[in-house]
Image: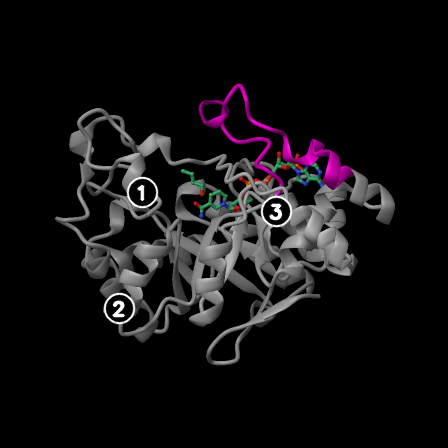
Amino acid sequence: MYTLTFRNNDVMPALGLGTWKSEKGEVYDAVLAALEAGYRHLDCAFIYGNEKEIGEALTEAYKRGIVQRSDLWITSKLWNDSHAKGSVVPALQQTLNDLQTDYLDLYLIHWPVAHKKGVLSTSKAEEQIPLSELPISETWTGMEEAVRKGLTKHIGVCNFGLQRLKDLVAVSNIKPEMNQVESHPYLQQNELLEYCKANDIHYTGYSPLGSPDRPGDLRKEDDPILLEDNTINAIAKRHKVSPAQVTLAWALQRGTSVIPKSVNPERIKANLKANDLKLSEEDMAAIKALDKNRRYLDGSFWFLKGGTYKKEDLWK
Ligand code: NDP
Ligand code: 1BO
């Protein structure tokens, strides 16, 4: 199994189970199937609306003796309406209650986007708060407090571009230890990954299969379908594995974590087996050449008429 080691020597299994769009009524079985299959890393978030059911599955897994809490790496994320310094710890406590645990291994700021308290999804500009009014540095102070209180072992961010990450490193007391970003052969983010590696920040690739079940408003007519890519399929055929296993093994071999989502027991098991696939240097080079800077989740849902968040700034 590929692993990533944190600054205090904590070890994270590099391949985890994604849970966005894992519906209530199916995520319970998916989590148990994943733990039975050998997953020890779960990627969760308050906004996925399923942390309570994941907590029930975890409690059942402990009861059945499949795992203990200390065997697991659990990540969750702070939602955009809780960026005020005083809101971070209460938001994390809600997640801990729902997941039925006393601590997280990793807590991440979900987006560099702030909403008014209680606004989960914004449709009007006035529901957003500009980062000039509620800066990431303030939110980070709340994240640091969560570490000091023992509620999470590590903290980091998601969806931070290079400059935004550098800015946070410059003002933080506890440096971020993770940047979770969209990453797959069509969006490799090599410069960002190099910066992370040079600065002891881990990198998790989300939507590693191209997020084929992303909500309809995030799909575009001309989206290239990652798992149908000719190069990926030729490599898969040569190794007698699936295209999904190729994209996951590529991510693991470039030193990143990866969190494929599935609620299908067979795909859950098969995805974990990407740990056993060894791609050759030629395979890695062929996949490297596929980069097209293609973002499937481009953040367009934050760009409201008259609003504060703009495409040209979000990914900077
Ligand atoms: P993925 O790229 O993981 O794709 C998930 C889709 O692929 C589902 O439709 C799933 O269907 C299908 N699938 C799973 N395994 C296979 C396989 N072996 N072959 C073919 N299809 C397969 O998309 P996500 O966007 O969900 O990203 C993964 C995770 O990353 C999320 O669940 C979430 O935890 C995290 N994430 C974080 C974000 C952030 O802002 N920090 C943003 C987006 C994602 P099925 O379930 O039926 O198997
Ligand atoms: C708004 C999309 C969140 C996925 O993590």
Q: Which of marks 2 and 1 is nearer the N terminus?
A: 2
Q: In this view, does 103 lie to the left or right of 167?
A: right
**What number is the disc on residue 144?**
none
Distance from mark 1 CB to nearest ligand 1 atom below 8 Å: no
Question: In the image, is residue 128 part of the stretch drawn in magenta?
Answer: no
Residue under pointer 2: 170
Distance from mark 3 CB to nearest ligand 1 atom below 8 Å: yes
Amino acid marked by disc 1: Leu
In space, the residues marked 3 and 1 are separated at their CA atoms by 24 Å
Eyeballing the image, is 197 above or below 208? below
Residue under pointer 1: 314
> Residue at the spot x=34%, y=59% of the render?
165
Q: Give the range drawn in magenta.
A: 209-233
Q: For numbered disc 1, what is the local secondary structure? A: helix
Picture coordinates of residue 247, whole percent (x, y): 67, 47
**What number is the disc on residue 260?**
3
Q: Which of 102 and 221 is in front in this view?
A: 221
Q: How crowded is mark 1: few (under 14 residues within 10 Å), some or many (20 or more)?
A: some
Picture coordinates of residue 22, whole percent (x, y): 56, 38
Q: Examine the rendering and report whether any part of residue 124 can be seen.
A: yes
Q: For numbered disc 3, what is the local secondary structure? A: loop
Q: Earlier in the sequence, mark 3 or mark 1?
A: 3
- Quarter holding residue 282: bottom right
Q: Residues within 10 Å of mark 2 (few under 14, many from 20)?
A: few
